[in-house]
Amino acid sequence: MVARQFLVLFSHEFECPLSDYEQRAFGQLLYRHARPVAGLVRKIWPDFFADDFNFIRCLGETTNLRDVKATAAEFRDTNVAGQNFWRTGLKIRVSGRIATRLAHELFSKESQDIEHDSGGSAGRPRG
């Protein structure tokens, strides 16, 4: 069985078409305190969330938690290197930690579903 990409799992979990993945993930992964101002920030400074959407696209392509963690680490490095007070100080951005937690939930749920669908016999001796 081929592992499904995060964006497929996300779209299934949140009942949204794949075409809406980036916008829906953006809303889900924003720090809670950033949600009320994100729309205004996007109107005033359209490219402000460019790194966030790049992270969301890369996250969507992942098929396992190890890749999610690597993608989140790259996003963290991008934020630190950017030295933008709004992003690092006030955390007006998406959260790599929230993304990692959500990915853990979705990938765990998928593996449980696969095990359940296969009769739960994975790893058990036959006899």
Image (spheres, grey):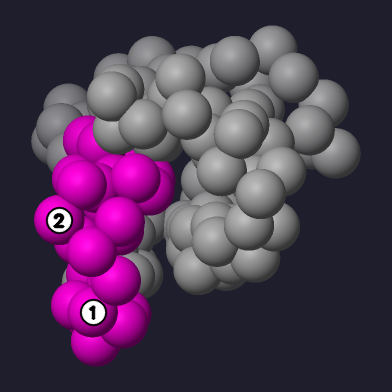
Nearer to me, 72 or 12: 72
Query: What x and y, as percent, mark residue 57?
Result: 61, 60
Q: Which residues are magenta?
A: 76-104
Q: Is residue 48 above or below residue 30?
A: below
Query: What x and y, as percent, mark residue 125?
Result: 14, 36
Residue corresponding to mark 2: 89
Q: Residues within 10 Å of mark 2 (few under 14, many from 20)?
A: few
Query: What x and y, as percent, mark residue 34?
Result: 36, 31
Secondary structure of residue under mark 1: loop
In the picture, measured across the screen, residue 43 lies left or right of residue 55, that is right
Q: Residues within 10 Å of mark 1 (few under 14, many from 20)?
A: few
Nearer to me, 31 or 12: 31
* Residue 104 seen in render: no
Residue corresponding to mark 1: 83
Q: Residue at x 46, y 20 (%)?
A: 36
Q: Which mark is residue 20?
A: none
Assess whether residue 125 is covered by the magenta stretch: no
Q: Is residue 58 above or below residue 16?
A: below
Q: Residue at x 15, y 56 (%)?
A: 89
Q: Residue at x 15, y 32 (%)?
A: 124
Asked whether the residues under the numbered discs 1 and 2 touch, taking CB atoms below 8 Å apart as contact, a structural biologist would say no
Assess whether residue 102 is covered by the magenta stretch: yes
Task: First in sequence, mark 1 or 2: give its number.
Answer: 1
Query: What x and y, as percent, mark residue 55?
Result: 48, 63
**Quadrant of residue 122 within the rendered picture:** top left
| Helix, strand or loop for the magenta stretch, by majority | helix
**Quadrant of residue 65 within the rendered picture:** bottom left
Q: Residue furthest bottom?
A: 81
